[in-house]
Amino acid sequence: MPDATSAAPTDRPTPAQAAAPARPPALSGVPVDQRRAIVVGASSGIGAALVRQLVSEGYHVAALARRAEELDKLAAESEHLGVTSGGRVLTRTHDVLDITAIPTLFEDLVRELGGLDLLIYAAGVMPAMEPREYDTAKDLFTLNVNTAGCIAWCNPAAHLFTSQTRGTIVGVSSIAGDRGRKGFPVYCTSKAAMNTYLEALRNRLSEVGVHVCTIKPGFVDTAMTKGMDGLFWLSTPEEASAQILAAARNRVNTRYVKGRWWIVGTIIKLIPSVVFRRLSI
Amino acid sequence: MSELVTESRPTPTAAPRSDFEFVAGWGMAVGAHARVLRPTDVDQIRACFDVARADGRHLGLRGGGNSYGDASVNEDGHVLDIGRMNRILGFDAETGIADLEPGVTIQQLWREIVPQGFWPRVVSGTMFPTIAGAAAMNIHGKNNYAVGTIGDAILDFDLVRPDGQVVTCSRERNSDLFHAAIGGFGMLGVFSRIRLETKRVYSGDLEVQAISSANLGEMMASIEERKAAADYLVGWIDCFGSGDGIGRGLIHEARYLKPGEDRNPEKTLALAHQELPAHILGFPKSEVWRFLRPICNDLGMPWLNATKHFMGKREAKAAPHRQSHAAFAFLLDYVPGWKRAYGPGGLIQYQSFLPKETAHDVYTEMLRHCQHRGIVPYLGVFKRHRPDPFWLTHAVDGWSFAMDFRVTKSGREKLWKHCAELTEIVLAGGGKFYFAKDLVIDGSAVRRMFDADKLEAFLGLKRELDPEFLLQTNLWRRLFA
């Protein structure tokens, strides 16, 4: 219940107290330091690296993921990283499939952080898929995590950032969204949808000064690529996170990680469909 | 898990729309995150109270968000934004009585009635406040000395109390609540319908005359002399004027045209005639604030004010001219987003109201004090007022002086200290402040400026209608908690 006593007339300050030198009200949520971030999908890979880097730069970061033990590990590491920078991390277990919980969770986190300047959606799944496998449940799971979860997190952030006329949204998508590949039909679909959604959001928010950055990683050395053959131009999660944050700060629209994947992406997009379907990519 | 896609289609509900956002005062010098609830009917207003109770949060009320300070900011709480209840329920072109949902803006109202030969009795300097916000703040216009505040034009209203009951209030029915809720800054309940009188006009134009004045004394004498005949009077003051020229400025006087004076009223009453210009000196008006940004500082502003003063002298030599109602009334809307010229720290408006006996000396002292401290308002607006029967009214038989101060990150503390010194001068002169503008006074000032009986009666009504103190804002906590 609202605290009735705080407003009761008997609690009003005496004239002597009230005559104390006037001080301006605290600026709640106003960009004093601009260093508050939410990272969704923070337990491993790129997300975890982003949290570590943000904390070591002095950010207050809310790190969200499904796996509590991974988050605990991250929190312990971050405590150490934040000693000199003043950064800190608060962790929450969260499954992005729990879409209805997101608005309230978002609100709680922003209140706890004292504002928000950066939202990073780094949650993503790429379930193993056999050549003749058509599993609708698995496909919808991929779509829900990669696309629906992204939309569900970006929407409240877009609304908040519009009201404060500043803020940055970063979506970690994939180069896989550039074409429909035979190996992972719905993974590619989910990332293509994410790319289009983020582009639309960028166009919608640019007039209020809010930036949306689409990240298209190539191969990154994370759990997702573990055991894959034929990897090349591999980034470590740390390299990826440094490039992602640099892109976000420079207000880059779309950034391949590493940058040279842009060449691959551009060529792949140019290959005619009749040729593309014969390739094993 | 996959049911998320198949079963998450949105369904219409009785719950008000809810968004979590940054809610700032209009002057951008204060703001806080809050969940904003946007009801569309009385049931949803009740639902807002329930949501706040269930979440253990206070509920602050917000109209158009045009109060300069913290009147609709509610840190750690929820905010009820009335803007979606914005239908004009009826307008009687015989009597000029408008029946409005609370979220109708002044803009909607004048656009509805001007082609029918009416104009709102009282409008603010901007057309974007809602009627509910205007009533809750008991706003005034440039004709306050002649027709009073908007409360004086309101016939009756429905108010949703925090317990969910809807009460109709007028001067005869629930008269106490009528006089307390108007000017009650949203602390007693939520307006759900307001009926008010508007004024018959015989032209879409006013006749406007500029009068230059060399100092404050001259301006006050000039306004005093004209106020019996003029329908509107407003003074602009160059706050940088010093010595004999302290309080120098320019008065604009306007009067309604009588029947027959406008040979073509259909044309002037048309909306097309009332629209504000889309371009200023050839630039799209939405971009003009960018040109003000580099001069909105202690070097540029003395120059801009002095230039305006000398241009005003020339303007005053010209014969009276005609100007549309909207162009005369909504000076603040000429340059959209002009507040952004003040920079990221925003601005505060320090508006004080003084009885006619002390006003001249107190305002002169305040201007001198500002110049001595080196914290001078970039814009000064001067008006004549009259008292009204509302319990927490700001209006007096006297004058008001609105001073716009730029807020910067480094100068904030100093500015607040400066304002505290000004407040002491105002209160010693028997002055008052206005909740739609204020961000700087404290609880002791409130007790000194209001009539003690009326203040106690207001707080008594608050305890009775809202015993759990559900309705709160930053302003309430700053001044009454």
Image (spheres, coloured by chain):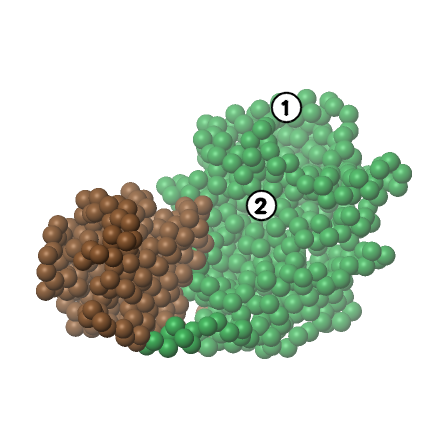
Chain colours: A brown, B green
Instruction: Name the chain under label 2.
Output: B
Q: Depth check: B51 or B449 in front? A: B51
Which of the image's four quarters has the N terminus of chain B?
bottom left
Confirm whether circles 1 and 2 share one chain.
Answer: yes
Residue at label 1?
B311
Relative to A45, B412 lies left or right: right
Locate residue A46: give its quadrant: bottom left
Residue A73: percent from the left, percent from the top? 14, 67
Q: Residue at x 54, y 39 (%)?
A: B286
| Residue A105, position as x, y percentages in the image | 35, 69
- Callout 2: SS: strand
Q: Quadrant of residue A61?
A: bottom left
Q: Left of A152 or right of it: where is B205? A: right
Q: State whether residue B217 is above or below residue B104.
A: above
**Amino acid found under the numbered disc labelled 1:** Met
Residue A151: which disc? none
Query: How far apart, in angstroms, are the residues tagged by discs 1 and 2?
Result: 25 Å
Q: Amino acid at mark 2?
A: Gln
Q: Which residue is mark 2?
A: B351
Counting from the top left corner in percent of width and height, residue B354 is at 64, 46
Q: Chain of mark 1?
A: B
Element on which disc 1 rests: helix
Earlier in the chain: of badge 1 and badge 2, it is 1
* Residue in the picture at 69% in, 25% down: B315
Q: Is residue B229 visible?
A: yes
Viewer-nearest residue: B97 or B474: B97
Q: Vertically, is B295 above or below B120? A: above
Q: Quadrant of residue A158?
A: bottom left
Residue B285: where, in percent of width, then height? 56, 36
Q: Residues within 10 Å of mark 2 (few under 14, many from 20)?
A: many
Which residue is painted at 26% across and 45% down in the image?
A266
